[in-house]
Amino acid sequence: MSTPAPQVSSVRNPWYKERWTWLLMVMPATAVIAGSITMWLAVKTFDGLVADDYYKQGLAINQTLARASAAQEKGLVANVRFSSEALVIELTANPGVALPQRLDVTLAHPTRGGLDQKLQLEGVGGKYQGAIPVALNSAHWKVLIEDDSHSWRLSGNAFLPAETEIRINSADLKPVD
């Protein structure tokens, strides 16, 4: 005698009750969600280009080097103090070098051009101070100091908020050939 074979049920569940269907849809759904979040961040935090005219800046590099050399010849040294709302610069030079009445100061963020700040500081006797309109966030800031006629230039770096005081010495600049 032979035993009857067991009957196999051919009843299938609907697609939405199948585990594999949902497992296969997880990866594309994750990619869509991550793409949407990335798009939202890109639109919300757009800062524009750090510099729009790279070519013109490249052509002007010799002028920049000449201004750094002029600062070196004058023996300029700047002590820069940062506070939450003000910037104070004490500028000294070689004997006989007249110090300007006004300084143009640029605080440049390394990656976000929208955070750059340009200040004009008035001063007497080598001490200049002015208000910082927008609080500086934690970053490595490039500090550029120029006279109002742009004949010389000092540049340095500040790691805020760790450094609240920096010294920029023109003698530390590399000599220009």
Image (cartoon, rainbow, N blue to C red):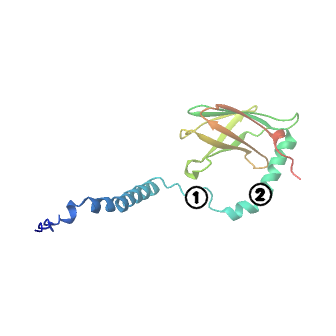
Q: CA distance from mark 2 to mark 1?
A: 19 Å
Q: Residue at x 52, y 54 (%)?
A: 47
Q: Residue at x 67, y 62 (%)?
A: 54
Task: Quadrant for residue 92, please give it.
Answer: top right
Q: Secondary structure at mark 1?
A: loop
Report the front residue among 51 and 87: 51
Please tell me how crowded label 1 is: few (under 14), some (14-19), or many (20+) other residues with Cα within 10 Å. Answer: few
Residue 61's tag is 2
Residue 29 lies, in percent from the top left, at 34, 60
- First in sequence: mark 2 vs mark 1: 1
Report the front residue among 142 and 70: 142
Q: Residue at x 82, y 40 (%)?
A: 172
Judged left or right of residue 29, residue 158 is: right
Please tell me how crowded label 2 is: few (under 14), some (14-19), or many (20+) other residues with Cα within 10 Å. Answer: few
Residue 87 lies, in percent from the top left, at 63, 34
Decide: is 114 above or below 171: below
Label 1 sits on what residue type?
Leu
Decide: is 153 above or below 94: below
Report the front residue among 11 and 77: 11
Q: Which residue is mark 1?
A: 49
Label 2 sits on what residue type?
Ile
